[in-house]
Amino acid sequence: MATETDRASAAATDPELACPTSAVVDIVFSRWTTPILWTLHTHGRQRFVELERRIGAITAKVLTQRLRQLERDGMVVRNYHPEVPPRVEYEITDLGRSLAPLFAHLSQWAAANLDRVEQARHAYDGQTP
């Protein structure tokens, strides 16, 4: 069993352990996680095809992979209904819903700062090497 000293020592040498938010970034900010969670939060329980249609550019394979990962992480629950034909629905969990304030803060930051980011990019790109 790892002690606090062992964890502190590991954190000093492993950058991923030193920054506890890196695990959160891996979970939350994968390419399709945000659109999936936003869609489920906004529109409620949905079937796979409904999610796929609402998100748009995502492939069925990638949507399946992301939903499985989100289910594994506790952000989404998969509801299987043994009917003919079988029906599967996905729903955001309370844990997934708890990310809403984080996304709201990010949205506010984006509204306040993306113009400045774009200006910095143009300034940087205009420099000669």
Image: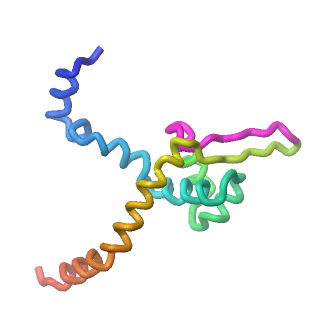
The answer to whether 86 appears left or right of 1 in the picture is right
Q: Residue furthest right?
A: 84
Quarter of the image where the C terminus is located: bottom left
User: Measured along the vertical axis of the image, is residue 99 above or below residue 56?
Assistant: above
User: Measured along the vertical axis of the image, is residue 74 above or below residue 33?
Assistant: above
User: Measured along the vertical axis of the image, is residue 60 above or below residue 92?
Assistant: below
Residue 82 counted in the magenta span: yes
User: Measured along the vertical axis of the image, is residue 32 above or below residue 15?
Assistant: below
Image location (x, y in percent) of residue 86: 81, 43
Taking depth in this image into account, of 115 and 54 the one nearest to the observer is 115
The answer to whether 23 appears left or right of 16 in the picture is right
The answer to whether residue 125 is visible is yes
Residue 76 counted in the magenta span: yes
Q: Residue at x 71, y 57 (%)?
A: 49
Color scheme of the displayed model: rainbow
Q: Image quarter for residue 82?
A: top right
Image location (x, y in percent) of residue 124: 18, 79
Image location (x, y in percent) of residue 119: 25, 81
Q: Residue at x 31, y 79 (%)?
A: 115
The answer to whether 32 appears left or right of 53 in the picture is left
Image location (x, y in percent) of residue 105: 39, 60
Taking depth in this image into account, of 97 and 25 the one nearest to the observer is 97
Q: Residue at x 64, y 65 (%)?
A: 54
Q: Tell me which segment is drawn in magenta.
A: 68-83
Q: Residue at x 61, y 54 (%)?
A: 40
Q: How many marks?
A: 0
Q: Residue furthest top?
A: 1
The answer to whether residue 69 is visible is no
Quarter of the image where the N terminus is located: top left
